Amino acid sequence: MSLRGKDIISISDIKRSDLERIFRVASSRFQGDELKGKIIAMAFFEPSTRTRFSFETATLRLGGNYIGFEATQSTSLAKGESFSDTIRMLDSYADGIVVRHSLEGAAKLAAELAEAPVINAGDGTKNHPTQAMIDLYTIWKERGNLDNLTYGVLGDLRYGRAAASFLKALNLYSPKKVYLICPEGLRPKQELLDSLKMPWEFSDLKDALPELDVLYVTRVQKERFPDPSEYERVKGSYKVDSSILKDAKEGLMILHPLPRVDEISLDVDSTPYAYYFKQAANGVPVRMALLSEVIP
Ligand code: CP
């Protein structure tokens, strides 16, 4: 089934066949005119480096143009205009709308308001579907498959939407096992745990590491803590450095959606395990593939 004209709100709405079509398109040659004459609106109500710039680059590389904002102070939102009216305006100007927001459900609401397809560029703590596409694509490209691998997901599994989306995306595959590695206070919400279809268990990094094919690391999401003292308790409580990696399996891939704060030390960057910058670079071809499949 085609994704043409569809809203992309959660990775759970995507079929494995659609995802793998995106992977194949992302790894093939683009003509460069797939979005000729199209305008994509980039509505970033929350800061971003990778997602925003890679969507903009993807649009330009496909021959399209974009409009948009990141600082809402530069729009009439600063004068009190509502989210809904802003989305309605963008819908009347653009052929597709990319939305990032701090609140869960913002992208879904935008999709209900807009006729143009809406792509969720990350909202709240649960969904960042295009990040999950990039994460899986990075593994698929290196390993050729995603089944039968042992995954570790380390970090803020409570407030991190990239980690939540990565775990939900793995539901489309058959991992051998997933180890959830996090401080007590950053354990995933029960709803996410209940949705996991693969074998999983809580572990710590040292115990799980020798088994891992993929280690997915995330930062503590400081901006999403309802209580700052809760953040103070868990910050700096885990770190991947080159000394712990002496027990790593050959071929281990370390992924991170970035930005990194201090959870992967700089000495890991020069090891063969570091895939996170390659992963960020894959944002452009994956978002090119998605836009070329979705925009009518
Ligand atoms: N990975 C990610 O979403 O990064 P940005 O917040 O910089 O877009």
Image (spheres, rainbow, N blue to C red):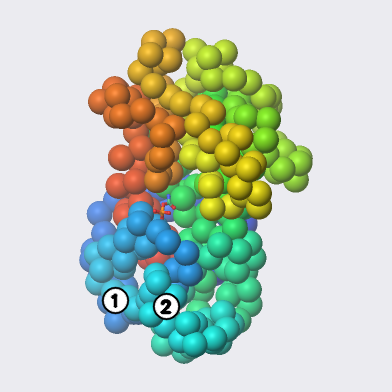
Q: Is residue 283 above or below residue 85?
A: above
- Residue nearest the observer in this picture, 55 or 21: 55
Q: Amino acid at mark 2?
A: Gln
Residue 132 is situated, as x and y percent measured from the top left of the image, at 50, 47
Q: Is residue 225 left or right of residue 219?
A: right
Q: What is the quadrant of the C terminus in the image?
A: bottom left
Distance from the alpha carbon under mark 2 to that under mark 1: 22 Å
Residue at (49% x, 13% y) in the render: 210
Residue 259 is situated, as x and y percent measured from the top left of the image, at 40, 45
**Residue at the limit of the structure toward the top, as seen here:** 247
Q: Amino acid at mark 1?
A: Asn
Q: Is residue 104 above or below residue 114?
A: above
Q: Quadrant of residue 107?
A: bottom right
Residue at (40% x, 72% y) in the render: 71
Q: Is residue 266 left or right of residue 124?
A: left
Q: Is residue 186 above or below residue 246?
A: below
Return the residue at label 1: 65
Q: Quadrant of residue 44?
A: bottom left
Return the residue at label 2: 73
Element under disc 2: helix
Residue 240 is situated, as x and y percent measured from the top left of the image, at 43, 24
Q: How many marks?
A: 2
Element under disc 1: strand
- Residue nearest the observer in this picture, 260 or 212: 260
Q: What is the quadrant of the N terminus in the image?
A: bottom right
Residue at (51% x, 74% y) in the render: 117
Determine whether the beta carbon of the residue marked 2 sits less than 8 angstroms from the nearest atom of ligand 1.
Answer: no
Disc 1 crowd, CA 10 A, few/some/many (<14, 14-19, 20+):
some
- Residue nearest the observer in this picture, 136 or 279: 279
Q: Quadrant of residue 276?
A: top left
